Image (cartoon, rainbow, N blue to C red):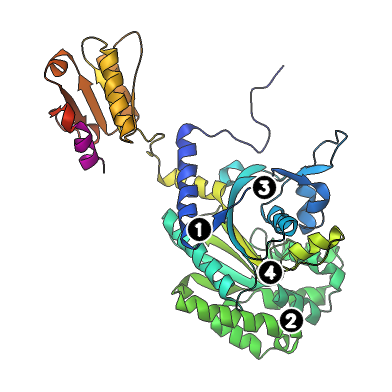
Amino acid sequence: MLELRTPKGTIDYSPRETMLISKIIDKSISIFKKHGAVCIDTPTFELKEILTNKYGEDSKLIFDLADQGGDICSLRYDLTVPFARYLASNKIAKIKRYQIGKVFRRDNPVVTKGRLREFTQCDFDIAGNYLEMTADAEIIKICVECLSSFDLGQFCISINHRKILSAIFKIASIPSDLHLTVCSSIDKIDKIQWEAVKLELITKGIDDFQAEIIKKYISKTGSNDLLNELKNDTIYGLEEGKEAIDDLLLLMKYIKIYKIENIVQINLSLARGLDYYTGIIFEANFKQEEVGAVIGGGRYDNLVDGILKSANRKDFTVPCVGFSVGITRIYTLMQKKYKNIKDNDTLVLVVSSGDQFLENKMEILNELWDNNIPAESVFTKRNDFLAQLKYCEQKNIKFCLIIGQDEINSNSVKIKNILKDENFEYIQRDDLVGFIEKNRI
């Protein structure tokens, strides 16, 4: 028997829920545009070989599509790799871009925490050669602006550098072919205890001594104080360590200029298990919530070049840095706060008392629509005046406009602000649009 349900890890969204998601996206887009971004779109599925070997151990979470005698394809795992493919395909050397779209992961879903198999991502990236760490600093600034606009309380952005992790692994004498899989284990430190992470590392060939070196470093958090401490550590004597620490010191200098230094911390346990990161990596979390990271990103300077090499094409290097807003997770939080949000933009409900006065209502609706005023009416056989008033209240529509025979004879309407529970007042038809415009906010 057919089960009337959505597939595991997917959900339907009601009009109210969709409206809330749209508000999150609209807030983000307005900030992206303020920073000069343009929008692109890419296919929901890509050639499988484009997505292969880009996500570390998470590659097993990619949804493969059935072979139907054509291209071998997979659903996109994120929007970053398709963006890099777009840059490579079109030989674009510089762009600030944003993109909103569904992505798909064969993850173990937890709906209450916004962890789904199909979810919406909202990405912003800066591609191209810029002065050192300027694009990275702007990216962090944009993250702060987005999270502030959601008005969901205090948040923190944790930053690390992929080359710091590489330097730690060198100090611990961990073979280079284990670096990515060790990163994947460290990336779980905010979800499970260190002992569980250590056990996983040991199963991957890391011994107790190496694990303790890793623990010594990844337990450190701070700001410039931590970076200055690391300058006096063995790690600064390694090329990767020096480059990463100098990068982060410069980044923190720019972050102070942008007046967001109190929101940012250096966290050496942050790993982000994706293969393509080459520089800074970062995540953002709301302090009072347990939905996990709501923003994640970093620098990926070799992804475009790597895709071209896989295609035996001429090298075309485009340094990139960017992030993804976890729309579904933020929606989960906003749903708790905005319980009474409208599911529509309707400003005026046009109703009639007594008779239908259908053509008169249509004339009024047409006038409102022509003046870009969101309005609607209820066209049913039974003209139930009280039911229409109730509908206006249920939909949280601000103005209820009433016409009857008296109003038609006097070329007027009665109008009431339902939200303020004011009395009805008479308005001449010629003054209707002006009255609504004046009082719409």
Mark earlier in primary sequence (2, 4): 2
Circles 4 and 1: CB atoms closer than 8 Å: no
Please report the bounds of the magenta region as a residue range: 432-441
Q: Is residue 143 magenta?
A: no
Q: Name the kind of residue labelled 2 in the image.
A: Glu
In contact (CB < 8 Å): disc 1 and disc 3:
no
User: Residue under circle 4?
Assistant: 319
**Residue lying at 44% horizontally and 54% vertically, measured from the top left:** 150
Marks 2 and 4 close (CB-CB < 8 Å): no
Circle nearer the viewer, 2 or 1: 1
Q: Earlier in the sequence, mark 4 or mark 1?
A: 1
Q: Residues under labels 1 and 3: Cα distance?
A: 18 Å
- Earlier along the polypeptide chain: callout 2 or callout 3? 3
Q: CA distance from mark 2 to mark 1?
A: 32 Å
Q: Nearer the observer, disc 2 or disc 3?
A: 3
The three-letter amino acid code for the residue at tag 3 is: Thr
- Give the SS element for disc 3: loop
The quarter of the picture where the N terminus appears is top right
Residue 71 position by quadrant: top right
The spot of residue 246 in percent (x, y) is 63, 84
* Tag 4: amino acid: Pro
Q: Residue furthest bottom?
A: 232
In the rendered image, which residue does mark 2 sit on? 240
Asked if the residues shown at circle 4 and circle 3 are in contact, with their CB atoms under 8 angstroms apart, the answer is no
In the rendered structure, find residue 32 and report the number of the disc placed on it.
1
Residue 4 sits in which quadrant? Answer: top right
Badge 4 crowding class, 10 Å Cα cut-off, few under 14, some 14 to 19, many 20 or more, is many
Which kind of residue does numbered mark 1 sit on? Phe
Q: Is residue 135 visible?
A: yes
